[in-house]
Amino acid sequence: MSAVTPFPADARPLLEVRQLSQVYNLNRQKLFAPRPKLKVLDSIDFSVRPGEAVGLVGESGSGKTTLTRMLTGVERPGEGQVLYDGVDVWTGGEAHEKLFRRSVQVVLQNPRSSLDPRMRVGTSLLEPLRSLRIEGDHAARVLEVLDQVGLDKNALERFPHEFSGGQLQRIAIARALMPGPKVLIADEPVSALDVSIQAQVLNLLKDLVRDLGLSLVFIAHDLSVVAYTTSKVYVMSSGKIVEVGKPLDLFRNPQAEATQALVGAVLSVEAGLAGSALA
Amino acid sequence: MTTSAKPHAIEVNNLVVSNGDVTAVRGVSFTIPQGGRMGLVGESGSGKSMTALALMGLLPMGWNTHGNILHDGVDLVTQSDKALSSRRGRTLSMVFQDPLSSLNPVRRVGDQISSVIRRHTGADRKVAEAQTIELIKQMNLPRPEQLVRAYPHEISGGQRQRIMIAMALACYPQLIIADEPTTALDVTVQKQVLRLLNGAVRDRGSALLMITHDLPIIAAMCDTVAVMYAGRIVEIGPVQEVFRNPRHHYTRGLLDSQPTMDNIALDGSSRLVSIPGMVPPLHSLPTGCAFNPRCPAATDKCRETMPELGSNGVSAACWHPIQTAGEVAAQ
């Protein structure tokens, strides 16, 4: 098995955010009081190089989802820049924004709610090509992508309710692959799946990164799952990146308090059998 | 069958739960001794939650129970709804997965706990309120006097789940059923809640039935484990034995598909062993062993005849149980 790093160590980041901050206004506590502000992202620097798999972990409320919204261009940052291939996606012109939109695709947590229940799978898969106005042989592309995620072509005529959770997540991954992205952003892609299926989907994501040379941003709360899929992990806590490192280093020698809390929260069968899991 | 001399917290014999042609639980038997802790592991559709609901007498409309559920000297299957209702919260109680949808949103959490105490012990309001505050203190919750006056939406998920646990434990039940009690919680809170449940159950001497798909939780909390697949228990035994030397190929697969620090290689070349295929739908189970289409060791016998627990002298329902290192050496 080849274990070479698929990207040169000094490669330019493909997707990057610089000094990103975002403030939300909360509801007034009193009638004439100013609206309180909440800094959900605080001077975030984050980057992914071509072919690299990075993880993003943190407790709920740490800002993971907001950062994902920035990375995918769903939300415009208050301060700072989102760069794709070195160019700001919000000020870089229409052609560059189009390139960014098709090159960064997302897979969400629950495929049952992210696939339209009334749309045949085949139609769902064609949606990104239609909305991004991508020309070409769509039928051939659908078959190619289905093959990449390990689904049969008779899936195309069926509806989402006819599939199990694991198959639906494969379909959601297939849809994300349709426009030929360079970066795949996966937000908790396995936490809604059964244990025996989680491993299948994690292996699939890993294969795609290797075979297609994709960059992967893997967002999760479970450090061991992130460690399995990625080679670099960012730890977030209350809107800040508090630690960056290789997954095993973070596990063995966590520095930040938030990392220590996450590492301490990992339960393993071994620790349980040894009677030390809840100590 | 006569009840044994020392009564168990619960004894389930050949439990079947069905709705017309669909059978969710297909003959499940287990016993939990007083103060014992059993884990029930399985994936969605394995029938583990239906088993729990059958024990509580809380099955949805249209579902019927057959078999025996012996608890506190009676067979729960034959009890009236009224009799079951007076037991729930008193001799057996349940902690559900999502506290936000199982707490009453328009009642203060303190009132919800104290009404359980008043109903089952007949204590007056003052006494019940004092006991409620004492319980909340035991749950390591901050400012109990203020917290009893809070509504469920005003407190965090971890706090809500502790309120649920307090409610379940209020009347010192013989058996507590916890159905995925930490799945809806944040990872860092999960361990705190488990630790609390662990201590609270131990202090009361209650038995625990822990239902989850999370094997590390079972390893941490339970002394026996039953693995369910497609409505049947496919392996049962002491946690230490089953998790160290699984006999059923499904148990082995579940253990192997957990990412741990040991099976992750530094160079990213590692792969998780995954179980191919998926759980079969209840209305079209394969003949023979239900696991045979996904099993690495399946033979024609597996496709024809369904194995029973113990049919090969091991506590796994398998025609070709995995051999332990000792058995391999002996051959």
Image (cartoon, coloured by chain):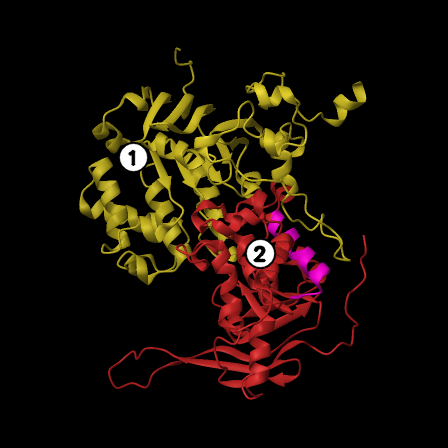
Q: Please state which amino acid type lies under the numbered disc 2.
A: Asp
Left or right: where does residue A53 sit relative to residue B159?
right
Secondary element at tag 2: loop
Q: Quadrant of residue B115?
A: top left
From this viewpoint, which residue is outermost toward the top? B2
Which quadrant is home to the C terminus of chain B?
top right
**Neighbour class for label 1 at 10 Å: few (<14), some, many (≥20)?**
some
For disc 2, the chain is A
Residue B137 visible from this viewpoint: no
Of the pair B128 and A144, the residue shown nearer to us: A144
- Frontmost of labels 2 and 1 is 2
Of the pair B52 and A5, the residue shown nearer to us: A5
Residue B217 visible from this viewpoint: yes
**Residue occupied by mark 1:** B88
Q: Position of residue A138 (x, y in %)?
A: 57, 63
Of the pair A172 and A9, the residue shown nearer to us: A172
What's the colour of chain A in the image?
red
* Residue segment shown in magenta: A199-215
The answer to if B202 sits in the magenta stretch is no
Left or right: where does residue B22 sit relative to residue A18?
left
Q: Please state which amino acid type lies under the numbered disc 1.
A: Arg
Q: Quadrant of residue B301?
A: top right
Q: Position of residue B120 (x, y in %)?
A: 24, 36
Q: What is the distance, in whole Å, between disc 2 and disc 1 at their CAs?
A: 35 Å
Q: Position of residue B165 (x, y in %)?
A: 38, 45
**Residue occupied by mark 2:** A222
